[in-house]
Amino acid sequence: MLKLTKKADYGLIALKYLAERPETPALSAKDIADTYGIPAQLLAKILQQMTKKGILRSHAGMNGGYALARDPRVISAYEVILAIDGPFFITSCTKGARGCELTSNCTIKEPLARVNETIAGVLKSISIQDLAESEPPPAHGSGAAKLVSLAV
Amino acid sequence: MLKLTKKADYGLIALKYLAERPETPALSAKDIADTYGIPAQLLAKILQQMTKKGILRSHAGMNGGYALARDPRVISAYEVILAIDGPFFITSCTKGARGCELTSNCTIKEPLARVNETIAGVLKSISIQDLAESEPPPAHGSGAAKLVSLAV
DNA sequence: TCAGTATAGGACTAAATATGTCGGAATTTC
DNA sequence: GAAATTCCGACATATTTAGTCCTATACTGA
Ligand code: SF4
Ligand code: SF4
């Protein structure tokens, strides 16, 4: 419940890895997978999905691989999760077609939709750059503090 | 991914329903389940779990049922989710025993732990009372605005 | 005291989702 | 042309979620 999929997790790891190596022209899925012990074929698919969504650039052939398509500061965690796992909803109802049958008479749908927006906002406020920068565990509040407004 | 379980959903619905009827001494699981078309036995278990965690009071026998154990203002959505679905973690690693094998050399674990705390904070800031009050869809920002500090 | 109503809880099944694998085709470099 | 690599769909497996069944226990009121 309310858990990130490993695919999204893997995707974030890979992006962070790429963000930390801006000089390298490209890294193959296998390279990254081996570094972290992630199943190579699975990671390959994840990178492909991100490529389709414009987060990565890909290049086939020898010395090919993937590179960030944009500055890591303008790639949000939200965007990554969206690319890998599809639309982001904490409830089952908003999930397009076969949602929840209670949708019509459910009374907590609206409040939860706002919670959903808030969490999405949190995720949107985090960039790949933020992940890459937080290498040294900050003593206390060293990172940039962000304010998220929540209306319930 | 990052989706609330239906059990937590059902639990919140039931609590809201109870919060809106402070005068009634108790409502049975069946009553609530029938009102919303939720599987009765499933809801019963959910209510039992919340009773064990001290969110509800229960009473067997005729005219028995469940009632809020505390003021709805001091029951948070976080607490409810915790009672129903167990410890709240968006990542697999922090999940006690059989987590993720990457835990040792994973570089995004720490940042994600902070995201986890932020989301938990959002959930903690929402009370059952908030859910019950938001009945009339507010025009815009009618609800109490809350600020959540996020350090990445 | 007994019948009816309700909670309590274990064991189980079924459905859905997440995770990982296989096999092959297309692309690029050397 | 051979090796490295992305690309893509179909498949298989594992885990989680959702829901059911059955039985025991507790309380109420006639
Ligand atoms: S309709 Fe209500 S119960 Fe169904 S998924 Fe949406 S919020 Fe949850
Ligand atoms: S260790 Fe890293 S990859 Fe594994 S679950 Fe935690 S954050 Fe995700």
Image (cartoon, coloured by chain):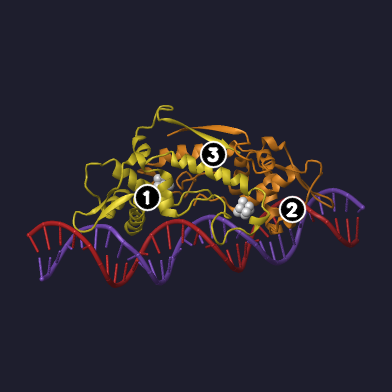
Chain colours: A orange, B yellow, C purple, D red
D10 on left or right of A95: right
Residue visible at 74% across and 55% down in the picture: A35
Tag 3 secondary structure:
helix
Amino acid type of the residue tagged 2 in the rendering = Ile
**Chain letter of the residue beneath label 2 in the structure image:** A
Mark before the other along the chain sequence, 3 or 2? 2
The quarter holding residue A6 reads: bottom right
State whether residue B21 is above or below residue D18.
above
The quarter holding residue B24 reads: top left
Residue on which disc 1 sits: B11
Do the dots labelled 3 and 2 sit on one chain?
A: yes
B148 on left or right of B16: right
Residue C26 percent coordinates (x, y): 78, 52
The quarter holding residue B100 reads: bottom right
Residue D2 percent coordinates (x, y): 89, 62
State the mark number for residue A32. Answer: 2
